[in-house]
Amino acid sequence: MLSELKELWRFRELLRQMLARELKIRYKNSFFGFLWSIVPPLLQVVVYTFLVRGVFSATAKNYSAYALCGLIPWTFFQTAILDSCQSLLANYGVIRKIYLPREIIPLSYVLSNMIHFVLGWVVYFAVFAVILRFFGLGIPLLPSMLWLPVIILVESLLVTGLSLWMSALNVFYEDVKFLLSTLFSLMFFCLPILYPADVVYYSEMIQRHPWLYKLYLFNPISGIITAFRKTILEPESPGSFVVRLQGKPALPMDWGMFAATSLISVMVAIAGYSYFNYKKWQFVERP
């Protein structure tokens, strides 16, 4: 793997050029450019806020901040993996004609989405930590926010590993992209994206079998989204989201589970890159 990384570093200028090309193509002839990366989550938040407050009678003081805190990392996770999954087939002609480290292609898609991921957080803090504070609707600046770069790094490792893994598999089994789309649609409602993980913890089944909650957070993306929410936002009682849970206290940040999540993400990154290197010279033999 060390030799593969050295080879990748030698081609870093090509990676930079492919990243620049991907960013240009994404918003070619688009008037609003980058804003299209943040507008869909914002519109989703508006709809979900209406549903949660108007239909389910939730009383969370700043539900928009909580929902967007889950949607930003989820959007990066989903979009980066789906984009990179199809990247090798989209550039199959390049692979067959030119020598280059094959991983440059999916990595350029991951990095492109990572840039929008970071910019999404910039917009998030500009809106909720600066602008809306003048109207009494913002979020306070907490010391725990200093963990944000670490959590971003952990998610980036997880996404990179899965992207390399799925892109290599999709070359030989094109069902992978359809399976991923279906899986992500189901995961959207199962993971703590629109609601805090505390709501899951206080459910009847979890209370009867507490070990299931550890298993729930053992899914690294669940642990990552929860870490973002716990470090960026003040504790919010789960009763603010689900009426029947009123009086239940908010759970503290579980640093042990986050350490486990970080370890899993590192392992996924190593395993994904190893599998990609094992398969990459077989891509041109694809039937």
Image (tube, rainbow, N blue to C red):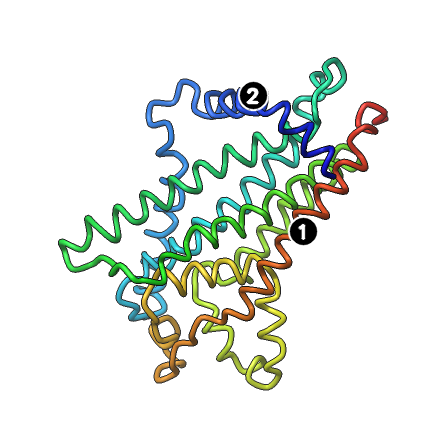
Seen as rendered, the residue at the extreme left is 134
Name the spot of residue 115 as percent of width and height, x first. 45, 36
In this rendered view, identify the residue nearer to me: 153 or 58. 153
In this rendered view, identify the residue nearer to me: 136 or 152. 152
| Left or right, 147 with reference to 131 | right
Compared to residue 257, the image places residue 110 above or below, namely above
**Residue labelled with disc 2:** 13
| Left or right, 130 with reference to 52 | left
**Residue labelled with disc 1:** 268
Q: Quadrant of residue 263?
A: bottom right
Which circle, 2 or 1, is nearer the viewer?
A: 2
Q: Quadrant of residue 29?
A: top left
Name the spot of residue 260 as percent of width and height, x first. 60, 65
Compared to residue 215, the image places residue 143 above or below, namely above
Q: Quadrant of the N terminus?
A: top right
Compared to residue 154, the image places residue 10 above or below, namely above
Whether residues under marks 2 and 1 lie with C-beta atoms below 8 angstroms apart, the answer is no
Q: Quadrant of the C terminus?
A: top right
- Residue depicted at 53% across the width and 50% down the height: 155
Which element carries disc 1, helix, strand or loop?
helix
Labelled disc at residue 33: none
- Residue depicted at 58% across the width and 47% down the height: 157
Name the spot of residue 128 as percent of width and height, x first. 26, 52
